[in-house]
Amino acid sequence: MRPALLNPLFAPVTSLSGVGPKQDKLLRYLLDRSETPRVVDLLLHLPTNVIDRRARPKIRDAVPGTVVTLEVTIDRHRPPPPRNSRAPYLVYASDDTGDVVFTFFRAKPGYVEKLLPVSETRYVSGTLQIYDGIPQIVHPDRVVDEAGMAKLSGIDPVYPLTEGLALGSLRRAISQAIQKLPALPEWTCPEILRRCHFPPFTDALNRVHVPIELTDILPDQPFWSRLAFDELLAGQLALALVRAQLRRPAGDRHAGDGHLRNKIIDALPYALTPSQRTAAAAIAEDLRQPIRMLRLLQGDVGSGKTVVALLAAAAVAEVGRQAALMAPTEILARQHIKTIAPLAERAGLRVAILTGREKGKERRDILARLFEGKIDLLVGTHALIQDDVTFKALALAVVDEQHRFGVRERLALTSKGEAVDVLVLSATPIPRTLVLTYFGDMDVSELREKPAGRQPIDTRAVPDSRLSEVMDAVGRALTSGKRVYWICPLVEESDMVNLTDAEARFKSLQERFGDKVGLVHGKMKGADKDRVMAEFASGEIGLLVATTVVEVGVDVPAATIMVIENAERFGLAQLHQLRGRIGRGSEASTCLLLYRESLSEMSKARLAVIRETTDGFRIAEEDLRLRGEGDVLGVRQSGLPGYRIARSDVHAQLITQARDEALRVMRENPRLEGERGEALRCLLYLFERDEAIPLIGAG
Ligand code: ADP
Ligand code: MG
């Protein structure tokens, strides 16, 4: 149960005055929540900039184009003439050096009269402009009287907004939210507070929202850092609490004698690479230990992770247990089952697939067989974590492309069995700090070499002014029977604008190459997607126009050419993932990165990296290095998914410190008892990392 003292923070934002249904909708969008945001969501929405209103010149000395706060006497009003509501409402004011005009468009009746009463003194702040030779402020940001002025620091926070949401109304909501902050117990130990110069949590939150100095809102300063540390600590503690439940009952082992694994290895049309063998052995060893496995299997696209995962599943099947493999997309799940099913069959391993598409009787049958233990390995999507999916004896959860799933999903899957072992597959090498952030301490296996017989990829960057040459080249390739991917950017699957790009490109390519062209995108029905993919795999269509749905896992070894449009709009990791779809067969491959001139320095650097290397580990390092340099990619990109305050670039140091602190807590107070323990529970609830708390008593 959440401590009562946090209740005010978890009240809906609509309980604040001035926040109605319209604001609710805007705030959901802004704060990325599917339901009405809570007060705490507002509080954790931090400013990214400030407006400095401390300049207090006389009118004569005010610099046009700058933000100033003027002390003026209001002289007279000139409302718009009746019948001309388009004309502005003007207010004339002055000080002893000159005159100024305040301009309001479409002002509500009575509003300006009340705001700026004639012959009174007011402090008016906004951007000064000269219009017809007269100083003017259009829609002043702030108008206060003497008493109001005394309360302002002169520095206003500026928040990320969304269209339709005014800064002023967000500020008003946030300042009410701050009033709701209760006195919170201190959960961070005194040494850290001292060492990092951290203020108390409440002070930090106050100072970031009500800055006194311009630097107060900077992420690397103590106020923001304190909040980031607490958020990271909550995350690390939650992971450590889960990890602490790792011992399994004595005598309970999750790997058998190897008879199924040997059958699979015998059925393989190729030999395992040395690193596949090493990884499989490490996993088998983990499964034999009396401690639960938490292992990350990293390997570039095409390095052969699936078969390693299958061997792990076979190991648990040898002792009569079950395994689950959860993939982030339906395409990927089907791809897995396609690779896995023939091999599994040869070994007598029973596999099935469960996604959103298995419905009705089919689904009921799968669930029944799963519950009876007649399925050894269930492959699927999110559908695997639905409540009515019940295993007879789940012992291993394999999670593919984990960074798309959160901790909650992973827990939801592992809670379907006892002492479930976890194997995470990732195609993008995750930097150490991120592994820590999302998994805590975790073992890592790497598949460093590519399976034998892979051909290098020739990657070239081409300005889109040469589009027609590229089209010609694609035409020649199609004639000679080659298979081509044509990727159009679609950063988010909901991005309808970009979707039309893909459709438009599909049409223009179809006009030219006829029915050799297919289209696949995230908005299509699963069955349609599969059909198009199958046609491409079989060669019925030679040119596949696709959005980034092909980014992960899709395997058509015969495809040897990839054109990526607007390559400058993709991140490095994404480009690498995409390109990994080619170069999988025995033929040489070509990747053309079409870019729109003129490129920013950052885009140039990214394309250069992609051209130079296909080593995913190097690309990941370069990615981090490039992102670290300034904010070229914007604040959002350097943030950590699932974290609102901590950022990968500024707070990397804090991640390790939070990990150490979490481990110390687990050593000294694993049940979170006493005053400090209560405070830590409060922290977990505050940042909604409380999913592990019920586990504490369970021992
Ligand atoms: P990823 O690591 O991207 O998931 P996959 O597991 O999908 O890679 O493997 C890519 C392709 O490589 C598959 O077609 C698979 O059959 C093949 N493969 C896997 N291991 C080897 C190997 N040791 N030798 C040759 N081909 C392999
Ligand atoms: Mg894969």
Image (tube, rainbow, N blue to C red):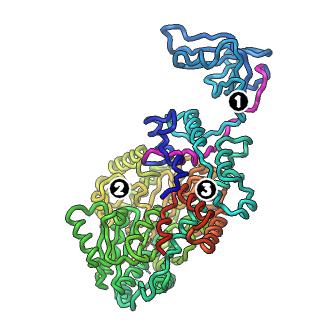
Q: Which residues are magenta?
A: 35-59
Amino acid under disc 3: Ala
Position of residue 157 relative to residue 557, above or below, is: above
* First reached walking from the N terminus: tag 2 or tag 1: 1
Position of residue 57 relative to residue 323, above or below, is: above
Position of residue 548 relative to residue 11, above or below, is: below
Amino acid under disc 1: Val
For label 3, the crowd category at 10 Å Cα-Cα, with few meaning under 14, some 14 to 19 and many 20 or more, is many
| Residue farthest along the left direction in this orientation | 361
Amino acid under disc 2: Val
**Given this view, does label 1 or label 3 mark the residue nearer the observer?**
3
* First reached walking from the N terminus: tag 3 or tag 2: 2
Q: Quadrant of residue 516?
A: bottom left
Mark 1 lies on a secondary structure that is strand
Q: How many marks?
A: 3
Which residue in the structure is indicated by mark 3? 646
Q: Which mark is residue 197?
A: none
Q: Which mark is residue 520?
A: 2
629 or 392, nearer to the observer: 392
What percent of the width, then of the height, locates residue 334?
Answer: 33, 67
**Given this view, does label 3 or label 2 mark the residue nearer the observer?**
3
Instruction: Identify which residue is drawn at 55% across, 55% down.
Output: 686
Cα distance between the residues tagged 3 and 2: 36 Å
Left/right of residue 491 with respect to residue 536 in the rendered view: right
For label 1, the crowd category at 10 Å Cα-Cα, with few meaning under 14, some 14 to 19 and many 20 or more, is many
Mark 3 lies on a secondary structure that is loop
Which residue in the structure is indicated by mark 1? 67
Instruction: Identify which residue is drawn at 69% across, 24% down.
Output: 128
